[in-house]
């Protein structure tokens, strides 16, 4: 083949092969070896496209960070398309428990590190943002943990929820007020908003922080952008650049953050049947086309353009899927990996007593993939629902039982804590463990889900106090309140005992609700 066909045709043929096949071909003959060596850049760039590591066929190696969104951490040691593919495969295998990974403690300062409430990690800039139970926000260097910038407890309230993306930092103040700050290193060409300005309190806080941390300026520093005064008190908010959604179950406000302008004010129809029942909002999510309200009595999907309710997935179902999986006691491990890999099996149906009217359960969190096609939902009873290409629901031809993939994590008698989702990997913390779930359908492949568990973190008391979980290219970050010693087994439990537990429904109503989260210091599992 290498002697008979033009080079361009051979490269096109090889573009349909995974890296594993190209590496095997390299050993077939000296002719193949020489061809791949001479055309290495084109061949391995095509392989990166084939695997989905890059989105654009004409991407340049120098543009992996800006154009493709790869983080500097994930590009460590990369100097060619071949080493890029090798690095991506290495990270991918580590996430699946098939290569080495480590557990590290990250303690932000100067505030009490036992007090971390929320975490935001920016691997592009190399910073970690943490808020605290007793108030305050700290920005630390991602690599060495050194303090770069902070806002005091006097300015940022206790238990502040933090949102961050593309250099914009947003957190709630008392009442209806949201403060917006902008990372100095990412000011770019954006002009300050005209509809809303920083107030004197925000300016004073900035001046104090600028003076206190002058030695690190501009690294990790933020400057005031604006104050958003939401018309009414809301229950939850979520920022997906450039839009901030802040909402209750009955009213939603959409702000364009760069201009500090209110894009849309959505009020639920007075004829909505939900107005006649008690509701709970635990989390909100948004995409380019939809708004998601998560809690009780349903996950509600609304049109972002019209505000119309498109679908309700009720939270009171025992089973949601014709493909419901549970974890097997059979596990696999690899040398130097912090993860064990569980086999999964199709779970037998869960029965309901004849006299039972309904099950009270809420949804704790929801996330949509960056591409906007896939949805992941976390139930209170340690299970996730994955909806690949969820818009099939809205087309009316299929039900959620047909589409959903349900995975029970450990025991349904234990509470769920937190959910993270990057589009291909799902991170979950429950009262039984820390999990990383891989669902082949999310990458257009067939097969059952694969579930990895962080064995060293099988510590129930600490798990029940996790207050945040974040997933980046190379690590899973979470709050962790207790001393971290992976070699100490004294507080660990036998995970198989959880798999023997069975949730028994009895009486007319069964109740499962998520309780308030406590707080803890930050830790991370690194690929």
Image: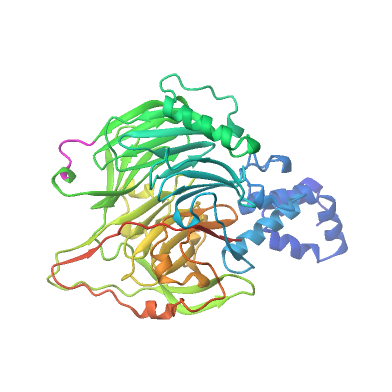
Tell me if residue 270 comes above or below residue 192 in the rendering: below
Q: Kindly identify the residue that appears in the image at 36 percent across and 53 percent down.
A: 365
Q: Position of residue 147 (x, y in %)?
A: 59, 46
Q: Position of residue 173 (x, y in %)?
A: 37, 37
Q: Position of residue 73 (x, y in %)?
A: 66, 51
Q: How many marks?
A: 0
Which of these two is toward me, 103 or 358? 103
Please name the colour scheme applied to the rendered image: rainbow
Q: Which residues are magenta?
A: 268-273
Quadrant position of the C terminus in the picture: bottom right
Does residue 183 show up?
no
The image quadrant of residue 292 is top left
Does residue 446 show up?
yes
Q: Kindly identify the residue that appears in the image at 63 percent across and 59 percent down.
A: 91
Tell me if residue 82 comes above or below residue 449 in the rendering: above
Which of these two is toward me, 406 or 502? 502
Tell me if residue 307 comes above or below residue 161 in the rendering: above
Q: Kindly identify the residue that appears in the image at 80 percent across and 57 percent down.
A: 1
**Residue at the far top in the pictured view:** 194
- Predominant SS along the magenta part: loop
Q: Position of residue 379 (x, y in %)?
A: 33, 60
Which of these two is toward me, 131 or 251? 131
Which of these two is toward me, 63 or 257? 257
Q: Is residue 272 magenta?
A: yes
Q: Is residue 259 magenta?
A: no
């Amino acid at each position: 083949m290498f002697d008979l066909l033009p080079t361009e045709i051979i490269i096109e043929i090889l573009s349909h092969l995974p890296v594993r096949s190209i590496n095997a071909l390299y050993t077939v003959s000296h002719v193949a070896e020489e061809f791949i060596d001479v055309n290495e850049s084109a061949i391995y760039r095509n392989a990166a496209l084939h695997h989905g590591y890059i989105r654009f066929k004409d991407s340049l190696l120098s543009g992996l960070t800006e154009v493709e969104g790869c983080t500097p951490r994930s590009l460590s040691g990369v100097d060619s398309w071949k080493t890029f593919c090798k690095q991506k495969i290495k990270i991918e295998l580590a996430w699946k428990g098939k290569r080495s990974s480590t557990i590290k403690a990250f303690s932000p300062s100067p505030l009490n590190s036992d007090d971390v409430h929320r975490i935001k990690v920016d691997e592009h800039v190399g910073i970690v943002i943490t808020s605290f139970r007793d108030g305050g926000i700290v920005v630390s260097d991602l690599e060495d943990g050194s303090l770069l910038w902070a806002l005091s407890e006097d300015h940022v309230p206790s238990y502040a929820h933090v949102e961050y993306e593309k250099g914009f930092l947003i957190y709630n103040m008392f009442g209806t007020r949201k403060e917006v700050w902008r990372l100095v290193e990412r000011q770019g060409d954006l002009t300050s908003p005209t509809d809303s300005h920083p107030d004197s309190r925000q300016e004073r806080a900035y001046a104090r922080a600028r003076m206190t941390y002058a030695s690190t300026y501009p690294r990790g520093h933020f400057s005031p952008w604006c104050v958003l005064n939401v018309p009414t008190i809301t229950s939850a908010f979520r920022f997906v650049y450039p839009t901030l959604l802040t909402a209750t179950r009955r009213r939603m406000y959409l702000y364009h953050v760069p201009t500090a302008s209110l894009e849309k004010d959505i009020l639920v129809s007075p004829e909505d049947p939900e107005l006649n029942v008690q509701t709970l909002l635990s989390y909100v999510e948004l995409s380019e086309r939809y708004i998601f309200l998560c809690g009780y009595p349903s996950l509600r999907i609304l049109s972002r353009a019209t505000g119309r309710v498109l679908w309700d997935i009720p939270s009171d179902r025992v089973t949601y899927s014709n493909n419901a999986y549970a974890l097997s006691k059979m596990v696999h491990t690899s040398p130097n990996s912090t993860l064990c890999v569980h086999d999964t099996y199709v779970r037998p149906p869960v029965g309901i007593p004849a006299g039972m009217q309904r099950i009270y359960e809420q949804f704790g969190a929801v996330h949509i993939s960056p591409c906007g096609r896939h949805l992941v939902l976390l139930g209170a009873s340690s299970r996730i629902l994955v909806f690949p290409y969820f818009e099939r629901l809205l087309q009316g031809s299929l039900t959620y039982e047909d589409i959903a993939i349900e995975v029970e994590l450990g025991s349904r008698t234990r509470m769920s804590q937190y959910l993270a989702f990057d589009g291909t990997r799902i991170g979950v913390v429950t009262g039984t463990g820390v999990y990383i779930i891989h669902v082949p359908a999310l990458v257009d492949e067939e097969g059952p889900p694969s579930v990895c568990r962080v064995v060293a973190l099988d510590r129930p008391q600490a798990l029940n106090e996790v207050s945040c979980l974040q997933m980046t290219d190379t690590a899973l970050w979470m709050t962790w309140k207790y001393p971290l010693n992976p070699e100490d087994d004294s507080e660990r439990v036998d995970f198989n005992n959880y798999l023997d537990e069975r949730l028994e429904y009895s009486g007319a109503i069964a109740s499962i609700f998520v309780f308030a989260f406590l707080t803890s210091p930050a830790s991370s599992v690194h690929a």
